[in-house]
Amino acid sequence: MRSSSKLLNVADHDRDSAGLTYVYPVVSRRAGGVSIGVNLNPNNACNWRCVYCQVPDLKRGTAPAIDLARLESELRIFLHEILHGRFMKDQVPANVRRINDIAISGNGEPTSAREFEQVIELIARVKRDYDLPKELKLVLITNGSLIDRSGVQEGLRLMAALNGEVWFKLDSVTREGRQRINNTRMSLKQMRENLRTAALLCPTWLQTCLFQIDGEPPDEKEWAAYLKFIESLLQEEVPLRGVLLYALARPSMQPEAPRLSGVSQDWAEAFRGKIQSLGLAATLHQ
Ligand code: SF4
């Protein structure tokens, strides 16, 4: 989920009352435009439980069966409204009245939807029918844990032809760190394999959340392991685009919330510098 953005609805700022299940707009001053969000997890279910997760009532699980006809109709209604209706005029500040991307980024892990590949096909079909900016991106925000599934890989292949990008979550490369932050037991080997697969199929960025637990930023063991991991990926010529470093912009909805705080600007800048010195782009999103 995008942290510092503001959810708005075409009709009345309340997506439920407008009857939209899967599609929502995110107006971001920071990103300078409107992102069309596609939420494949309206049940707030994820196979991970990150301590900073902003999803309220998050539960363990997977996306429910997706009503593809409904998703397609919501997307069409939405695009029509954005392109021809009053949404931009009424709800978006003049300086950000442009569509940035379509972002598959919901209240849980989107690739857990069994229909993931069909969702990408559907987006491709809808995109073709509208006069959208050529550079419009299709972004998948994922924890990367299910990229070994063939349907997900097919979806990524299709995404690559749609100006797609994968934002692959990487908060820690130690077993303890991933258990503590993401509450996942997925092995580093599997994660590395999934990341490699993603990067070979579709342009891929790493997405890393920077924060302190109990007032402490990641210790040297953590960040040194992270940098070593990135270095080894680069040596193996895994075609990564770069790293998106995120701060905690909205409060966590998890029980650990009171223990979390942001890292200092200096810490974040220094960490970014270390990544860049390996020869990889890194951007900071505070
Ligand atoms: S992977 Fe995303 S949706 Fe799932 S728990 Fe983590 S932050 Fe929340």
Image: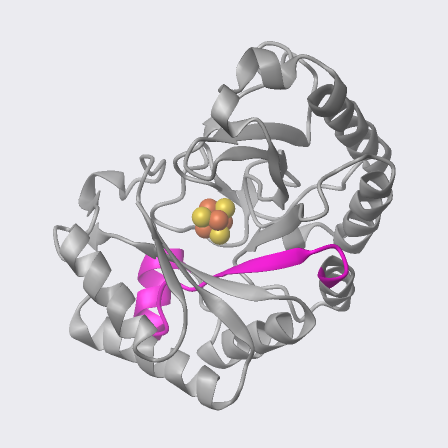
Residue 140: percent from left, percent from top: 61, 52
Q: Is residue 15 visible?
A: no
Residue 61: percent from left, percent from top: 58, 48
Report the residue at 61% width, 58% height from top.
165
Give the residue at the far left of this rendering.
Answer: 215
The answer to whether residue 215 is left or right of residue 134 is left
Q: Nearer the viewer, residue 99 or 227?
A: 99
Report the residue at 17% width, 59% height from top.
267
Give the tally of numbered discs.
0
Vertical position of residue 53 compared to residue 143: above or below? above
Vertical position of residue 67 compared to residue 141: above or below? above
Q: Is residue 55 visible?
A: yes
Q: Quick check: is 175 in the magenta stretch? A: yes
Q: Which residues are magenta?
A: 160-183
Q: Nearer the viewer, residue 184 or 33?
A: 33
Q: Quick check: is 52 in the magenta stretch? A: no
Residue 21: percent from left, percent from top: 68, 27
Say which quadrant the C terminus sits in: top left
The answer to whether residue 99 is left or right of residue 252 is right
Give the residue at the far front of this rendering.
Answer: 95
Residue 214: percent from left, percent from top: 14, 51
Give the quadrant of residue 162: bottom right
